[in-house]
Image (cartoon, grey):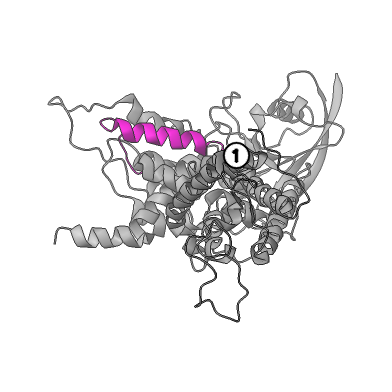
Amino acid sequence: MATAIFQIWRGDASGGKFENYSTEVSEGMVVLDAVHQIQAESANDLAVRWNCKAGKCGSCSAEINGVPKLMCMTRLSELSLNKPVLLQPMKAFPLIRDLVTDVSWNFRVKKKIKKFKPRTPDAKDGTWRMAQQDIDRVQEFHKCIECFLCQDVCHVLREHQLHDEFIGPRLLVHVAALEMHPLDVEDRLAAVKKTGGIGYCNITKCCTAVCPEGITITDNAIIPLKERVADRFYDPVKRLLRFLFAKH
Amino acid sequence: MAEIHLTDPHHKFGHTYRRDIWWARPLIIFICLSVFLVYVTWAAFQGNHYTFGPYLSPLYSPEVFGDSPHSWFGAKPGWWPAVLPWSPALLVLWAPGLFRLTCYYYRGTYYRSFWADPPSCTVTEPRKKYRGENSFPLIIQNIHRYFLYIALFFLIFLLYDVWKALWFTRPDTGERSFGIGVGTLVLATNVVLLGGYTLGCHSLRHLAGGFLDRFSGAPIRRSTYRCVSCFNRKHMLWAWMSLFWVMFSDIYIRLCSMGIWHDWQII
């Protein structure tokens, strides 16, 4: 058994500081195991949000040595234990206490996105038919566990705090899942350009790099949405053709 | 949406809690792109040593006006402003240049390495104000697809250059005969790499079928989309390989033309 030191952010919205905790670590442990051990041994009041411990609930998002990660999916063997392991809450959201942030902004914004609106049913019994090849693209987006690590790492939210103008990668993935859905007939392109602020994304792919589900957020969701927005609003030839062939 | 208050989000430029050498990647990219830009600018303004036998440097292709046998419409045009230096490359190089400049991959890359916007993930930026691609001038990036259309024509021109690079003129008889030189392979590799890069373009992926919500009933569209997506998955790799090979192709032809390197004829 080896001993590792963890520097954990302690505090709330009014302020705080990193505090050192040492604990025994063993093979196979993940960061969340160590945090629970510290909680049991020396910091009973340490606030940490967690649930499944299997990388599927998206609750234990935090920044480990400055990189947004799920604590339950980060093995201690991946980290250098020669130096203290730095643990802090996500920076892009308001801090509640210690490692827990208030991510409710994401849910409030999500509610404002136009809901799924299917076309008229294909069959008389009110059901639809979809081919697997039509749903392949969208299924990748449905892997999202809403850990909001992509929102945390996005510099538009994290650094520039443009929460009121940009919905962030997670919600752009949500919009892409709806827009590319073979049954959906709703139009969200004007909204994703204006209130969604897709133009703020400058494609640095940090969101893709931190996604624990391996969703290719930038290439498969954001850029295709940007192209659809370009089709509608920035392509002069397409605008002219739409004008000429529109039903007046 | 504006009800969010963060605690102490501001730090000075370059601040991060990351422990890795996060600055290495943007620095290497900065150096590589700078070397490429400096070399290509220098080579474009030379106006000489851009052909050797049947080879034409990709930086000068297509040679619309120029003094070499590759020229389409003869020597330097009379309307060219006297105050501007003349080089055949200046007529064509803007197109592939703008294609790369507006490319989604390069955008993300040079925003990081040249603008530090951000320098790397979770690293503090030098500027507080940020407008992204939402307003002028970066909103112009949205016309990337038009440079794609031009780039597709350039692929055809470069393919034609490879065809011409297969026909050598014998100095003793003046007859043209089939052959393959190292330069032929260099130019052929250039087309393959540029093809991989261009055919993996995000805008092409959209045009090939990405704009559709349903692929069933459109098997050709689906196959095309899947093919472009296949190239797109390695877009970064194609982008870098093609970038360096374009530069190397020019260096190869330039050095052969200057008599420093010898073009070895394989067949």
Residue B49 shows in the view: yes
> Which residue is more in the foreground, B5 or B249?
B249
Q: Which residue is mark 1?
A: B189
> Which residue is more in the foreground, B262 or B236?
B262
Residue B166 shows in the view: no
Task: Tell me where the magenta segment starts and ends, as one range.
Answer: B210-235
Name the residue located 47 percent from the left edge and 40 percent from the top edge: A220
Chain identity of mark 1: B
| Three-letter code for the amino acid on which mark 1 is drawn | Thr
Q: Is residue B199 magenta?
A: no
Is the residue A195 above or below the residue B181 in the image? below
Q: Quadrant of residue A79?
A: top right
Residue A160 locus on image (x, y percent): 60, 59
| Image side of residue A58 versus residue A108, left or right | right
Residue A198 locus on image (x, y percent): 46, 54
Q: Quadrant of residue A229?
A: bottom left
Residue B157 locus on image (x, y percent): 48, 50
Furthest-bottom residue in this view? B83
Magenta segment's dominant SS is: helix
Residue neighbourhood size for the residue with mark 1, other residues' Cα within 10 Å, grouped as few (<14), some (14–19), many (≥20): some
Is the residue A207 above or below the residue B88 in the image? above
| Image side of residue B79 versus residue B17, left or right | left
Name the residue located 48 percent from the left edge and 60 percent from the top edge: B72
> Which residue is more in the foreground, B97 or B261?
B261
Which quadrant does the N terminus of chain A fall into? top right
Q: Is residue B218 magenta?
A: yes
Residue A26 locus on image (x, y percent): 79, 19
Please tell me whether mark 1 sits on a helix, a strand or a loop: helix
Which quadrant does the C terminus of chain A fall into? bottom left
Name the residue located 40 percent from the left edge and 36 percent from the top edge: B225
| Image side of residue A64 versus residue A213, left or right | right
Name the residue located 53 percent from the left edge and 52 percent from the top edge: B103
